[in-house]
Image (cartoon, rainbow, N blue to C red):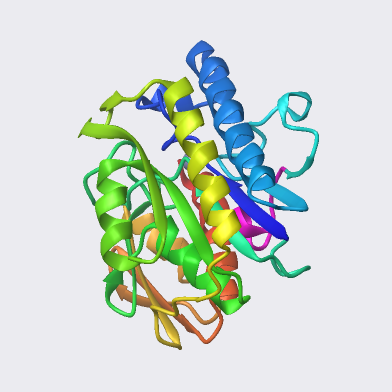
Amino acid sequence: MKIFISADIEGIAGVMRPEQCSPGNAEYESARGLMEQEVNAAIAGAFDGGASDVVVADSHAMMKNLRAANIDPRARLMQGKPRALSMLEGLQHQQYDGMLFVGFHAAAGEMGVLAHTINGSAFYRMKINGSVMAETDLYAALGAELNVPLWLVTGDDCLEKWVNHRFPEVEYVCVKRAISAHAAESISPQAAQELLRERVAKVVQAAPKSIEKRLGCPYKLELMVLRPVLADLFCMVPGVTRIDAVTVGYSSPKMAAIISLLGAFSYLASTQK
Ligand SMILES: [Zn+2]
C-alpha cells in the first residue's frame, strides 16, 4: 500500500508564531525539528497500519524544511521548488492509496493559527466556484482528480471544524486550540506524535476507498490579492481575467492547472515586495 504525506509547518504542535515558520530565525530551527518528529510519527503510523511505500512531500515555504538525515529511512522525501503540483508533487506519477496532510492550517481570511492560503503576503482570500478555499480544499480536490482519497488531516481546532464540515469522512487530529492568529494552546509535541501515530495506523489499516468530489468542474477561481499591483501583474498571464482592482479570475477543468497557476502567481508576487 502506497501512502502520500504532505507536510506543512504551521499546524504542527508547538508552532504558533510567524518566526517559527521563517528560515533564518533561531526559533525556526527548533520548529523544523518538531515538524520532523511529527512527520516521523505519521510515517511510523503508516507502516504500523500496513503501508509498503511512503513518500513525504516537504511543503512549506521553499519546501526544504525537513533534514533528510532526521527522517525515518523507510520513507522517501520530496523537497525543493518550483514544482508543478506544489504540496502534492509526485502524485501525478504513480498511484497512491491515500493521502495524509500533516501540519496544515486554516484558510486565508479565516480564524486560525497562522491562517493563510499558499502565500500570506500576496493572497488575501481565494474562492473556487464561490466557496472559500483552504489548502486542504484545494489539495483534496487535486487528490480526487488523481483518484487518491484524503484520509487524515492534522492542525488546529479551527481547521478541525472546517474539515469536519466539508469532509466528514476524513479523520482529523487536533494538536492545538487557536487563541489568535499568532497564539495557541498546544498539546505537547510528544503527545501529538503518539496520538498521530496511533490514528494514522488505524486509518491506513482501514484504507477507505471513497473519494469525495466536493467541487464541481469546471473550477472557477476568484483570487483576491493584498495590493492592486499584484492583480495588475497576475492578469498579464493569458487566460487570467481582471474582476476588480484586487481580484483576478481563472477557469479550468483541471485542478492541476489551478494549482500550477497559483504556484506561478506566488513566485510572481515575490517580485513586487
Ligand atoms: Zn506553510
Disc tally is 0
Q: Main secondary structure of the magenta part?
A: loop
Who's the residue at 53% across and 68% down the image? 208
Q: What residue range appears in magenta?
A: 79-89
In this view of the protein, can residue 268 be seen by the observer? Answer: no
Along the horizontal axis of the image, is 56 left or right of 212?
Answer: right
In this view of the protein, can residue 107 be seen by the observer? Answer: yes
Q: Nearer the viewer, residue 199 or 115?
A: 199
Up the image or down, 95 lies above or below 61; here it is below
- The magenta stretch spans residue 265: no
Along the horizontal axis of the image, is 165 left or right of 24?
Answer: left
Percent of width and height locating residue 224:
31, 62
Q: Quadrant of the N terminus?
A: bottom right
Residue 229 occupies which quadrant of the picture? bottom left
Who's the residue at 44% across and 30% down the image? 192
Up the image or down, 153 lies above or below 24; here it is below
